[in-house]
Image (cartoon, grey):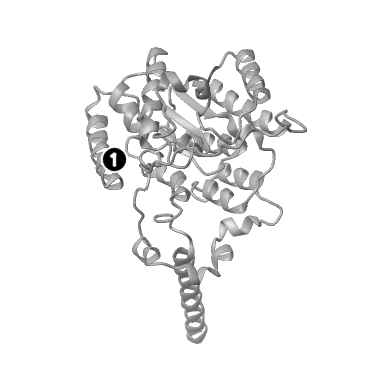
């Protein structure tokens, strides 16, 4: 009997060591998204947000939200407590699931969705899927998001056990993989990706004729789900098209979104049509030739949009001392990095 107990204990200890070793390797090899490709950290950062239950504005969408809107400016100018749940090339069905996840923690007054992703019917690259989905907390929402997003070459178990996907990443390990083994560092400002670089547009590609301009059935299906989810929770849904010069936004795209917004009585703003009112100067307000705004352009756009949101009745929360203290700390870090990047 004693021998059996000792044998059982040895087996248990050996299994525990193997499991702990695998977990250690998995954590070490999984990308930390704190240096080169920080976009992969944006979705996960939301869970560390203090007072997230008090957020009254949520953005969802792709790089056209996380690069183009400054939550700091929205707070400073209008007292709007906002967060951007954006990720690289976020598809419309991913936006739906990310919104579904977000509403487990907060019921905002309004949700802003950027319509560029309506062009996409199928996922393109695993790397973009992972930057959008790996940071989500495990739940039925995440499971459904992964299943709806996987490319033909992907495997669901690779998301459950990332070591299966990243086991060959040894040559890419950096000092930051050890430095941020147990913790991470904030790389965004309420989901906003700050860049102070200035690179004016040059040779912006013109739109080429397409065989079909119609958004696909899948895109419309998930936009309907986003709208219904907002309606069921008493949240105003606002559709926008960011003022990015490319990818090219066709008139046929614009007409479809306008018709949808009119049919469902939604606010829709195409910022490309208001760039002069906003005061955007693409020679100084973009960091990559017109694809994304830099911090100076994002602040202009946020100031203009925030005025509309304020006039629409979005609450000014600057009288809440706990939020003001939190934002004072965020603003201090924001201004320090802006100055550092500008040097």
Please rate how many residues cluster around mark 1, counting C-alpha atoms within 10 Å: few if below 14, some from 14 to 19, many from 20.
some
Is residue 190 placed above or below 182 in the rendered structure?
above
Q: Residue at x 44, y 66 (%)?
A: 28
- Seen in the image, is 201 located left or right of residue 120? left
Q: Please state the total of marks drawn on the protein image.
A: 1
Quarter of the image for residue 239 reads: top right
Q: Which residue is mark 1?
A: 334
Callout 1 secondary element: helix
Q: Residue 67, position in %: x, y?
A: 44, 38
The location of residue 131, given as percent across then percent down, is: 52, 49
Between 320 and 298, the one nearer to me in the picture = 298
Residue 169 in picture, x, y percent from top left: 52, 68
Residue at left offset 50%, top offset 23%: 271
Residue at 41 percent across and 32 percent down: it is 69
Question: Could one spot residue 282 in this view of the protein?
Answer: yes
Is 232 left or right of 81, judged from the image as shown?
Answer: right
Note whether 24 is above or below 61 in the view shown.
below
User: Against 39, is 164 above or below?
Assistant: below
Pick out the residue farthest to the front. 203
- Asked if residue 56 shows in the view, the reply is no
Q: Position of residue 54 (x, y in %)?
A: 35, 29
Residue at point 31% right, 20% down?
A: 316
Q: For the view shown, which residue lies furthest in the right direction? A: 211
């Amino acid at each position: 009997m004693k021998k059996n107990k000792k044998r059982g204990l040895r087996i248990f200890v050996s299994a525990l060591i193997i499991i702990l070793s695998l977990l250690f390797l998995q954590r070490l090899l999984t990308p930390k998204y704190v240096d080169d490709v920080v976009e992969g950290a944006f979705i996960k950062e939301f869970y560390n947000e203090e007072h997230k239950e008090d957020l009254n504005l949520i953005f969802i969408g792709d790089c056209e939200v996380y690069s183009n809107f400054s939550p700091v400016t929205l707070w400073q100018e209008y007292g709007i407590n906002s967060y951007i749940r954006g990720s690289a090339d976020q598809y419309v069905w991913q936006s739906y699931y990310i919104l579904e996840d977000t509403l487990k923690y907060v019921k905002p007054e309004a949700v802003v969705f950027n319509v560029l992703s309506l062009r996409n019917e199928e996922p393109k690259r695993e790397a973009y899927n992972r930057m959008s989905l790996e940071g989500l907390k495990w739940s039925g929402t995440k499971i459904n998001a992964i299943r709806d997003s996987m490319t033909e070459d992907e495997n669901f178990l690779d998301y459950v056990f990332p070591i299966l996907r990243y086991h060959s990443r040894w040559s890419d390990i950096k000092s930051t993989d050890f430095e941020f083994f147990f913790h991470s560092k904030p790389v965004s400002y309420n989901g906003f990706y700050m860049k102070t670089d200035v690179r004016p547009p040059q040779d912006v590609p013109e739109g080429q004729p397409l065989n079909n301009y119609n958004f696909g059935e899948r895109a419309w299906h998930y936009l309907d789900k986003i709208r219904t989810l907002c309606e069921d929770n008493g949240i105003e849904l606002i559709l926008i098209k960011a003022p990015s010069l490319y990818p090219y936004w066709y008139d046929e795209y614009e007409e479809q979104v306008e018709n949808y917004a009119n049919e469902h009585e939604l606010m829709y703003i195409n910022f490309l049509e208001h760039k002069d009112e906003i005061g955007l100067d693409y020679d100084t307000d973009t960091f990559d030739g017109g694809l994304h705004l830099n911090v100076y352009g994002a602040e202009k756009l946020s100031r203009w949009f925030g005025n509309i949101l304020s006039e629409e009745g979005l609450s000014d929360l600057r009288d809440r001392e706990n939020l003001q203290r939190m934002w004072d700390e965020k603003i201090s870090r924001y201004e320090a990095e802006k100055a550092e990047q500008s040097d």
